[in-house]
């Protein structure tokens, strides 16, 4: 970026921006950061296709109508924004094309719908990005993450305030899982809030806003701690390190972090000293819960008050010369730290420690411990090494195209040795390599890599007022990339949503001079032409899988109610909506089987198996139906086919 470009981007033009327009920009950006994050966060994290697609449809409609009305994008996009949209859009198109060679067109179209939602988030974020919008969007994200994290902590400390199923788990564990029903996901979600709250503690305009940002820090860290998520701790560490590496005027932020860390230490000590709260599967004794709640609230208040004192102190205190750091000095310190890190890694390799840690990572599970927090002392991968092995094996079968988005679960069932049901490879990078091949990995890794490099480079050239929010966004994206390397956060819709809004801040426009107010000139902006086209494609990609899923679920609900005619009607509707999908035909087969129409059920399950030939469930259901039809040879053949596709399952060991 040249000096001229910087002045155009960073300097406000009071002649073209009214106070009302700035307020609208700020409100819309804050709402985009807050509302979808809160909604998906409390809707199981947005893992379900219905909740996620609702947000996607709403976002693309806003983009479409805003483009037609010529109010979006608010500012023309810079080349870096076009590169980011191009890479993510290319990944979206590649996934859509993969339906032509995938093992399951239904699963691939569902993944395409997921990507359509994520692409819509990025496009709308860029379309709303302005010099005031970037700050508001970060505050909205910080507020939503702090609120959801606080509710998660309360679900453990005051479970009576929540529905009876709020703390229900897929598996028995003492770790905090609400509201995602997945501990690691909650921890990684909360970890993304640390850079945002550090930003709020010094970027907010009012002292009250800064105090609230600092007060929320120990609450969010407590949420990460109660999940006992190693992925969450990794994301927290990476996000914090990158934040302090990029932000200007680090000393006040370091002071806030030190105060918050002291408060966190008190909370962790209190949590560890309460074994029932720490390790119990159900609600802990009221005394331990209520005392922990009092400590958490007290720490939050003290940290907030301390932040007020720090703000007033740094406003009035003249900093000694030895506490003033030039950009060159900070850069030199960065080189020293990088050199120290390289030396430490070299020592780990030379002493054999790295090899020992790698061998421990390949272990299936951490050593058993009577203390839940004992798992933090181990680097055992919890089957991740095994997941990644199978993903690499799948990649080798089709290096360029992959086996098809959404189909890792089928390949895993056929080639695993653990006897475990798994949908995802627990790594965005390995799963992308397996399902979409080299092309897909280059696109998605190139997208995040470009954002990190472009955002970090941009930080070094922007003035302090704009450098702080961009540095915060880059730190959040780095934290997401770290979490995505070790977990399936890409499928937990709210976490990529946060990351993509941060991408919009990192590469989006801050300000641009108005080059003309006439409609003819306004439509010269390529984004005003491209976004409506993208919106139509995104809506189409989302609506078809969503409508099919809703129809299948309606059919299942009618079966539970005993209304089989309506169930068949809904199954037929689902089949018409997505003719290539297997689920509608499976549902039809199950309904006809209950009605005693075995011939119709046999035909439907045969059609379903033809659309998902590597899905062992289709062949197992087909074996049962063939048995009922009096065709034992076909039943045996189908059974053997199902077993070959999932040979380690306990179902076939009886």
Image (spheres, helix red, strand yellow):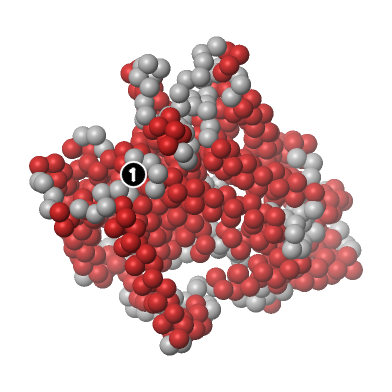
Residue 640: give x, y in percent of width and height. 81, 71
Q: Is residue 25 above or below residue 301?
A: above
Residue located 26% across and 49% down the image = 249
Q: As rendered, which of 511 and 411 lies closer to the eye? A: 511
Q: Is residue 352 left or right of residue 105?
A: left
Residue 23: give x, y in percent of width and height. 35, 23
Instruction: Name the quadrant containing residue 59.
Output: top right
Q: Is residue 4 above or below residue 470?
A: above
Q: As rendered, which of 43 and 636 lies closer to the eye? A: 43
Residue located 34% across and 58% down the image = 331
Residue located 53% across and 32% down the image = 77
Numbered marks: total: 1
Q: Is residue 576 above or below residue 374?
A: above
Residue 243: give x, y in percent of width and height. 35, 53
| Quadrant of the frame with the C terminus | bottom right
Q: Is residue 536 above or below residue 614?
A: above
The reply to whether residue 408 is in sight is no
- In the displayed image of the protein, which residue is found farthest to the top? 518
Residue located 60% across and 19% down the image = 523
Q: As rendered, which of 286 and 128 lies closer to the eye? A: 128
Assess disc 1: are there few (<14), some (14-19) or many (≥20) residues with their C-alpha within 10 Å of its C-alpha. Answer: many
Q: Is residue 141 left or right of residue 515?
A: left
In the structure shown, which secondary structural element does the residue marked by tag 1 occupy?
helix
Residue 287: give x, y in percent of width and height. 18, 61
The reply to whether residue 623 is in sight is yes
Q: Where does label 1 land, which residue? A: 468
């Amino acid at each position: 970026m040249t000096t001229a470009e910087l002045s155009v981007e960073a300097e406000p033009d009071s002649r073209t921006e009214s106070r009302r327009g700035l307020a609208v920009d700020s409100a819309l950006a804050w709402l985009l950061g807050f509302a979808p994050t809160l909604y998906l966060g409390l809707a199981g994290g947005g893992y379900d296709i219905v909740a996620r697609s609702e947000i996607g449809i709403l976002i693309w409609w806003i983009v479409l109508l805003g483009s037609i009305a010529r109010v979006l994008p608010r500012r023309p996009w810079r080349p870096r924004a076009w590169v980011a949209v191009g890479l993510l859009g290319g990944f979206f198109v590649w996934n859509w094309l993969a339906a032509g060679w995938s093992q399951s067109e239904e699963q691939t179209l569902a993944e395409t719908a997921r990507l359509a939602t994520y692409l819509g988030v990025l496009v709308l974020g860029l379309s709303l990005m302005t010099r005031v919008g970037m700050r508001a969007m970060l505050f909205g994200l910080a507020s939503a993450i702090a609120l959801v994290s606080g509710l998660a902590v309360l679900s453990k400390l005051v479970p009576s305030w929540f529905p009876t199923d709020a703390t229900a788990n897929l598996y028995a564990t003492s770790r905090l899982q609400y509201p995602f029903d997945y501990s690691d996901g909650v921890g990684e979600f909360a970890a993304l809030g640390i850079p945002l709250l550090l930003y709020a503690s010094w970027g907010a305009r009012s002292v009250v806003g800064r105090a609230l940002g600092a007060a929320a820090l120990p609450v969010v860290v407590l949420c990460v701690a109660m999940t006992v998520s190693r992925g969450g701790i990794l994301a927290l560490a990476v996000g914090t390190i990158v934040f302090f590496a990029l932000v200007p005027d680090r000393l006040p932020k370091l002071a806030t972090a030190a105060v918050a860390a002291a408060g966190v230490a008190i909370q962790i000590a209190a949590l560890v000293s309460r074994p029932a709260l720490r390790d119990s599967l159900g609600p802990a004794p009221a005394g331990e819960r209520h005392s922990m709640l009092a400590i958490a609230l007290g720490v939050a208040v003290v940290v907030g008050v301390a932040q007020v004192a720090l703000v007033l102190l740094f406003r009035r205190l003249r900093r000694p010369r030895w506490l003033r750091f030039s950009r060159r000095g900070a850069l030199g310190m960065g080189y020293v730290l990088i050199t120290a890190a390289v030396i430490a890694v070299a020592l780990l390799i030379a002493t054999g420690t790295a090899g020992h840690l790698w061998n421990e990572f390949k272990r299936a599970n951490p050593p058993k411990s009577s203390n839940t927090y004992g798992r933090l002392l181990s680097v055992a991968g919890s089957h991740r090494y095994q997941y990644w092995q199978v993903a690499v094996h799948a990649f080798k079968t089709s290096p360029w195209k992959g086996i098809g988005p959404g189909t890792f679960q089928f390949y895993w069932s056929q080639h695993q040795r653990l006897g475990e049901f798994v949908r995802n490879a627990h790594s965005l990078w390995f799963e992308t390599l397996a399902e979409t091949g080299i092309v897909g990995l280059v696109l998605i890794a190139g997208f995040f890599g470009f954002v990190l490099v472009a955002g970090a480079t941009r930080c070094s050239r922007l003035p302090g007022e704009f450098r702080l929010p961009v540095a915060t966004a880059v730190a959040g994206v780095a934290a997401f990339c770290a979490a995505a390397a070790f977990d399936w956060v890409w499928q937990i819709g709210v976490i990529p949503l946060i990351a993509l809004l941060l991408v919009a801040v990192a590469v989006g426009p801050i300000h641009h001079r108005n080059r003309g107010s006439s409609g003819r000139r306004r439509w010269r902006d390529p984004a005003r032409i491209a976004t409506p086209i993208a919106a139509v494609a995104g809506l189409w990609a989302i609506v078809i899988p969503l409508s099919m899923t809703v129809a299948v679920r309606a059919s299942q609900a009618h079966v539970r109610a005993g209304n089989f005619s309506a169930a068949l009607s809904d199954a037929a509707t689902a089949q018409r909506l997505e003719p290539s999908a297997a689920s509608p035909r499976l549902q039809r087969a199950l309904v006809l089987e209950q009605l005693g129409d075995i011939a119709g059920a046999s035909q439907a399950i045969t059609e379903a198996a033809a659309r998902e030939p590597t899905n062992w469930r289709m062949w197992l259901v087909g074996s049962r139906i063939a048995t009922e039809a009096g065709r034992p040879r076909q039943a045996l053949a189908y059974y053997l086919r199902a077993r070959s596709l999932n040979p380690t399952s306990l179902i076939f060991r009886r």
